[in-house]
Structure formats: C-alpha cells, structure tokens
Amino acid sequence: MERTFSIIKPDAVARNLQGEILAMIQAAGLRIVAMKQIRMTRAQAEGFYAVHREKPFFNSLTEYMTSGPVVCSILEGDDAIRRYREIMGATNPANAAEGTIRKKYAQSIEANSVHGSDAPETAAFEMGYFFNALEITG
Ligand code: ATP
Ligand code: MG
C-alpha cells in the first residue's frame, strides 16, 4: 500500500467539480484516507510550491492557488503515486490522454484542476504539510 497527496485546485472547486473528480479517483480504486476543503494563504501556497520558486510561472501559480478554496486529500492504494498521476493526465491538458481528469476538466496548463505528488519523498512532505496524524484515518 502506498499513499499520495492530492489537491482539487481552485478552477475545479469554483465549477463545483469536487464530487465528479473524487468519483473518478474512487472509480480507479484509490481510497480517501484524509480530506478537507481549505483556502490557502499566499505564504502557505509558496511553501507548498517551494520547489518551483525559481520558475517563471511561480508568482502566477501561487496567486492562482490562493484564488479560491481547494480540496486536499490523501489517497491510498497499490502504486498510488504513479496511478494517481496516470488518472490525472499530463500537466498541459492539450497533451492529456483521453479519460484523464485533466483532459476532461482542465482549463489551461496552469488551471489544470488537480495536483498529485510525483515521488515518495514529495508525497511525504506534502501529506505532512497539510495534515496531522489525527486527521488521517487508517
Ligand atoms: P502538480 O505538481 O500540480 O501535480 P505537475 O507535476 O503535472 O502538476 P509541475 O511541473 O509540478 O506539474 O507544475 C506545478 C503546477 O504549476 C502545474 O500543475 C501547473 O498548475 C503549473 N504550471 C506548470 N507549468 C506551467 C507553465 N508552463 N505555465 C503556467 N503554469 C504552469
Ligand atoms: Mg508537480
């Protein structure tokens, strides 16, 4: 069993798509072991995306991620990190495969509806950034 961290981003929450995206996640067999809807401060978004600090899109990205509420969750399953990335689809929706969340819902390379951890180390950091032990159910 592996765990990964997911965010349903502001563009999707603004269009009331939390339920539809969670249904796609659950249909793929991933289990939700923690979940909450929050609105990040700029400082929280900057800390979360610290690895992208030097990227040209960093300011725009952190502004977008704080533009409205997001749904954070921890997903569990076999090979959860890789499988969730597969269900999400490519970062740029123009390159996302049919049947993926980003192909179906993303609006642009920035407003791409979902986030998923890309490795065990980033998953561990991201889960701890948003959830404490009491908020994670077995
Ligand atoms: P995420 O980390 O959100 O799961 P990802 O791993 O597919 O997405 P990253 O390269 O980590 O992509 O980029 C993080 C986020 O920054 C993207 O999901 C997107 O919202 C935004 N982003 C990435 N590249 C660009 C770009 N060229 N222009 C604008 N925004 C971008
Ligand atoms: Mg990433």
Image: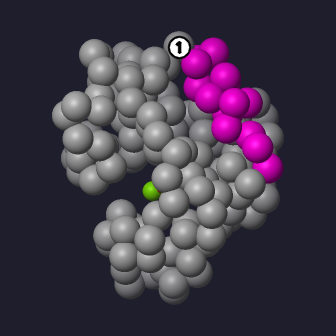
- Colour scheme: one colour
Which residue shows up at 55% across the image and 69% down it? 66
Residue at which label 1 appears: 29
Q: Position of residue 119 (x, y in %)?
A: 32, 44
Q: Is residue 95 magenta?
A: no
Frontmost residue, 24 versus 84: 24
Q: Is 77 drawn above or below residue 80 in the view shown? A: above
Q: Position of residue 37 (x, y in %)?
A: 52, 45
Which span is picked out in magenta?
15-28
Q: Residues within 10 Å of mark 1 (few under 14, many from 20)?
A: some
Which residue shows up at 20% across the image and 34% down it? 133
Quarter that holds the C terminus: top left
Image check: 94 left or right of 127? right
Which residue shows up at 45% across the image and 34% down it? 35
**Mark 1 belongs to which amino acid?**
Gly
Image check: 131 left or right of 101? left
Q: Position of residue 17 (x, y in %)?
A: 74, 40
Frontmost residue, 105 versus 93: 105
